[in-house]
């Protein structure tokens, strides 16, 4: 197949389920652990800066309103509302941290939910970067001429693991520790104040849209740092005393509950020591050389931050590499949309794309990290008009 010279994001969409939930109403939706209000909630939220988020949970009944596949399918349908017929999708690539099932893969479940004609379908696994690896697969498929168009998605229904029934009683000493060590908020007992639900979708085509602006994908760099660090964020297994990782199939079924094998956990010490250096610093250093990237080329910086706690460390890391992007060029909707994992960059791009703030020729640098075993990724987009 002939190689296309460029690929363009011609449409964006996002779907956030149900009404936004404010900080004081989280436990009305997720429930109270042990039947008592959390003593940790305010401390965690003060650190992460999130003011509202969305959950695919009915606050009146506690029942789910959407599966992950349904969230993703709804985001894709919203692309169609802008003039693209989803029954003409040639390639569908879906990334998520938490699919509804272990098998089959998330992508084919989304395809089935949509009920569209047969097409190529792929799902990418991982945590936050899974949304970008899905986008990279879609981009390369269109770039290579293998697909006439592609739709990429990122989605999460994190609330499935955040309900009160999944958590042990919080201990007083852990809550007290939050006051002096806010990074401990990433322990499994406190991740319920960090994560939320949502989905986003991007339409990729080999020519720019006829009217309005498009986003040309210039490059996508994804670099695993697993050679430099052990597992940090995980679910479906546990870390051993010697640092080895033991998967869920090596445990007895009774141990799955007793040892809390399936809830998401975080090695907070390792996270605090390494996440910015490994997922941003190391990747930026390599990309600067590989792509000739300089800070003055960046008009918009879109960092996927799980918490405002990491803003200053990112700034400090930039300073060390002489790559300072002023805060007025940063764009994030963490405060109003929450941390939606692999969907976050999609939801950010959708809001910025529709804001009317973009101008032809501007360059957008996106940063997406994940702390699973530390993967960092950078993507550059250029705003173009009908001429590309």
Image (cartoon, rainbow, N blue to C red):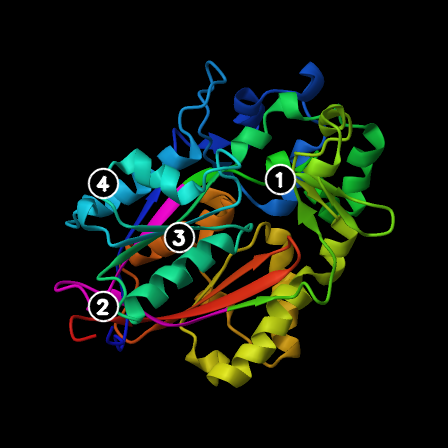
Q: CA distance from mark 3 to mark 4?
A: 22 Å
- Determine which quarter of the picture holds residue 179: top right
Q: Residue most toward the left?
A: 210
Q: Using the image, determine if residue 108 lies above or below residue 315.
A: above
Dot 3 or dot 4, earlier in sequence: 4
Instruction: Count how many numbered circles sit on residues in the image.
Output: 4
Q: Which residues are magenta?
A: 199-221
Q: Secondary structure beneath disc 4?
A: loop
Disc 4: which residue: 116
Disc 2: which residue: 206
| Residue located at (39% from left, 32% from top) | 17
**Residue 11 on image: x %, y %:** 25, 55
| Residue located at (33% from left, 49% from top) | 201
Q: Using the image, determine if residue 186 lies above or below residue 136.
A: above
**Residue 302 on image: x %, y %:** 46, 62
Mark nearest the camera among 4 and 1 is 4
**From this viewpoint, is residue 221 visible?**
yes
Dot 4 or dot 2, earlier in sequence: 4
Dot 4 or dot 1, earlier in sequence: 1
Disc 3: which residue: 346
Disc 1: which residue: 45
């Amino acid at each position: 197949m002939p190689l296309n010279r460029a690929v363009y994001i011609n449409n964006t969409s996002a779907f956030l389920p149900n009404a936004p939930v404010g900080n004081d109403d989280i436990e009305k939706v997720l429930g109270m652990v042990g039947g008592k209000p959390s003593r940790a909630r305010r401390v965690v939220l003060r650190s992460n800066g999130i003011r509202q988020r969305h959950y695919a949970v009915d606050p009146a009944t506690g029942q789910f309103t959407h599966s992950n596949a349904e969230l993703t399918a709804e985001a894709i349908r919203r692309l169609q509302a802008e003039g693209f017929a989803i029954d003409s999708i040639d390639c569908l690539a879906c990334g998520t941290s938490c699919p509804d099932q272990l098998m089959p893969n998330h992508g084919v479940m989304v395809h089935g939910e949509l009920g569209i004609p047969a097409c190529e379908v792929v799902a990418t696994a991982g945590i936050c970067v899974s949304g970008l690896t899905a986008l990279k697969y879609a981009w390369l498929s269109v770039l290579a001429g293998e697909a006439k168009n592609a739709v990429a998605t990122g989605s999460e229904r994190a609330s499935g693991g955040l309900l009160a029934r999944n958590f042990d009683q919080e201990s007083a000493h852990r809550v007290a520790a939050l006051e002096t060590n806010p990074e401990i908020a990433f322990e499994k007992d406190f991740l319920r104040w960090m994560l939320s639900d949502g989905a986003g979708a991007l339409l990729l085509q080999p020519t720019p849209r006829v009217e309005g602006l498009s986003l040309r994908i210039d490059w996508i760099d994804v670099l695993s740092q697993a050679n430099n660090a052990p597992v940090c964020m995980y679910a479906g297994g546990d870390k051993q005393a010697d640092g080895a990782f033991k998967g869920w199939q090596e445990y007895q079924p009774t141990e799955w509950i007793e040892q809390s094998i399936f809830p998401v956990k975080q090695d907070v010490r390792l996270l605090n020591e390494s996440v910015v250096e490994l997922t941003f610093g190391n990747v930026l250093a390599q990309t600067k050389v590989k792509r000739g990237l300089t800070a003055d080329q960046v008009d918009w910086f879109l960092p996927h931050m799980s918490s405002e706690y990491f803003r200053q460390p990112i700034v400090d890391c930039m300073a060390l590499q002489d790559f300072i992007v002023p805060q007025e060029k940063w764009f994030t909707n963490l405060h109003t949309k929450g941390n939606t994992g692999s969907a976050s960059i999609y939801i950010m791009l959708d809001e910025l794309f529709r804001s009317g703030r973009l101008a032809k020729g501007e360059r957008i640098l996106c940063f997406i990290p994940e702390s699973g075993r530390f993967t960092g990724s950078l993507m550059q987009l250029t705003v173009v008009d009908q001429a590309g």
